[in-house]
Image (cartoon, coloured by chain):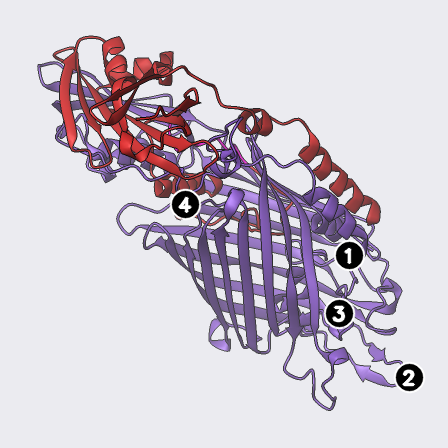
Chain colours: A red, B purple
Amino acid sequence: MLRAALAAVCLALWLMSAPDEARAQNGAPLERRTTGLHRHDGVLSASVGLQDLFGPVERQRLTSGFATRVLIRVYLHREGSAEPVAVTFQRSEIVYDIWDEKFRLRIARGAGGSAEFRREVKSAEEAIHESTTFWQFPVAELRRLQPGARYFLAFRADLNPISEELLSDVRRWLVQPARGQRRVGAGDSVFGSFVSIFVNPRIEDSERQVRFLSQTFVEPAR
Amino acid sequence: MRVFLPLVALAVTGPIGASAAWATPDTDASEELAAGSPAAEPPAPEFQDPAFGPSYVIESIEVRGNRKTETSLILGELAAVGLHAGDQVGASDGRVEAARFRLLSLGYFLDARLSVGRGAKRGGAVLLVVVEERGTIVINELFLGTSAATAFWGGVDVSETNLVGRGINLGAGFVGSTRPITEGAVRGFGIRGHASVPELHGPGISLSITGLLSDGSELFRVSGSDSDPDPRKFTAVHTRRGGGILGVGKTLSRSLRVYADFREETVSATVPDRMRMLGSGLLVPIDFGVRDGYSRVGSITATAELDRRSDPVLPRSGYRLSASAELATSWLASSYTFGKFMAQGSIYRGLRWGHVLGFHALGGAIIGDAPYFDQFFIGDLNLLMPRRALGLNFSTLPSRNVLGTGIAGHRYDDYAGRLLVEYAIPILRRHGFVYRGDFFVAFGPLALGSSGDFEGRSVSWSTLPLDLTADVGLRLDTYVGVFTISIANALSRSSF
């Protein structure tokens, strides 16, 4: 009994102490991308590219004829503080017209989505560029930044994000048998079962994600 | 338990990688950001315009990638959201995403994608559905253990969840054991077959049928103290059971399901002519909890389940509630008349750093004359003891009795309750074989008793049927399923 318990604990400790990707991925610094910063008309703006949100597969899917959505969040952080000073969004929708052979874009900026504009482009590259490139993207009013303090921007881009509720439903469907059926045994119980084996594809809250940080900058005296 | 406390402490102080939303190398905020706090992850505003982009008339629908699953089943899912040949579909139509997730919800596909190609005339389109099928053989449970009474028991329960491509779930499980060393015991064997079909369009109900056949022994104490697990101080009731359950289920909302089950079973028991010798030398009759010879169990059960957890494997928030009521009566050809009521609830609350606090409560009551195999069993309550496998018990181990109460004398009873507090810490998050892993600690009290427990006895701490149970370990969500590596799992499978 004791031997079995000790074996379980040793395995647990080994798993915990193994150099896992969690720390390589989560504990290690996020990529830094040099970001253009502009101060104009009392607004801090940023210029940077997030085109790597689209890989070859995602680029090909742009011509599916159905909408592809891109959500980009930008956070302004003061160094040393967990609470962002400001958060802003850009949401884009791209559809390909299979008869006219052109891409239509709808892009909205800001939390309220008030600044919405539409555009038509001919190629997938142009559509990706329009939806993922920031050129003097307004991030925050300069009056919210304290002169002499150090700040950085954090970017997160999601391709076809799905809601938390839908994500939870999909996970439940994958763990349980087909809709409405009950699982035999205790495989999904919180305690007790050692194993429940099934093909368990990873479902993310979006199809692809890009995260990075800007360089740290000091707000100049005004 | 005392042995493991230092190990638990060691585990807690080990390197823990938080579930990161952001990690910054040079700020004090990095840990806070890594926890994915609400401030760091505000919900994005809605951005839906179903009218954006062109619309097409669906001239035909093509399905690709379904080597096993019937095309008609996939077309049925599209039809359920209103996508048929002849319909109009917009480029930003919400039905497209709904159809995709309906297909994924079947559980037969790793992925499903919808696209359109040009139709025969301008404005027309061919709707193309490409699916990637997943393996549909599922191992539901592994039975494996050894105890002082039974040298070995083992078995497995396996299901095919998409039989002949029609979504039929067909499975079977078995468990076998060596002969327990208790007098009169026989080798145990149990087999369970089960089949179910997913919710049918129209009535929207799922149907299931389960058959169970078992031949084994239940062990009852004839001498020695309640805490003495020596199997030679027990006698065996040889019980053979055969029967089945016919069930229907209906999903009332995305998180609420109800089920009704009709059960019929025949029981053949050989009850030994033995009495229990108490420490004082007094002989008292043993309640074997089953009729000698042939008897039947017939019952109907209603169950409701509300599941609003954020995740079925490693929940971070939400709750799950379930309640059931089973009624067995001579009207259903039952030799036993009883009502069995159970309620269970779990609630999860996310804390800083991605840690999760969970509370689990379970309560049950039986009114009437239930056979022992329908009563609450200590092994099903106490995480540190072997659970029953397909209704068969292979151990004489009493509850661990951490509190020095009278729990050791309780094995099968009519009332049960358990409270557990669980603290989970995310330690693994990687892309690859292991998706996520939580280190968890859980503990709490349990109680198991019957209405006559205190008749003719004074109530004191040493007679209360209370105990503590606990578990410490890892819960892993991997590409091939869910694994729990814990102390309770180890102890419950080697119960000496």
In-front residue for pair B469/A131? A131
Would you say residue B391 sits in the magenta stretch?
A: no
What residue appears at the point 37 percent right and 52 percent down from the top-left corner?
B255
Measuring from the top left, give residue B287's x and y in whole percent: 72, 77
Q: Could you tell which of marks 1 and 4 lies nearer the N-terminus?
A: 1
Main secondary structure type of the part rendered in magenta: loop
Q: Quadrant of residue B219?
A: bottom right
Between circles 1 and 2, the one closer to the viewer is 1
Which amino acid does the dot numbered 1 rest on? Met
Question: What stretch of residues is rendered in magenta?
Answer: A198-206
Q: Decide if residue B303 is on the left or right side of residue A5.
A: left
Between circles 2 and 4, the one closer to the viewer is 2
Instruction: Give the crowd class for mark 2: few <14, some 14-19, many >=20 residues within 10 Å.
Output: few
Between circles 3 and 2, the one closer to the viewer is 3
Between circles 1 and 4, the one closer to the viewer is 1
What is the number of the mark on residue B403? 3
Total marks placed = 4
Would you say residue A201 sits in the magenta stretch?
A: yes
Q: Tell me how far mark 3 sits from mark 2, CA to CA.
A: 27 Å
Q: Is residue A178 visible?
A: no
Callout 3 and callout 1 share a chain = yes
Q: Chain of mark 4?
A: B
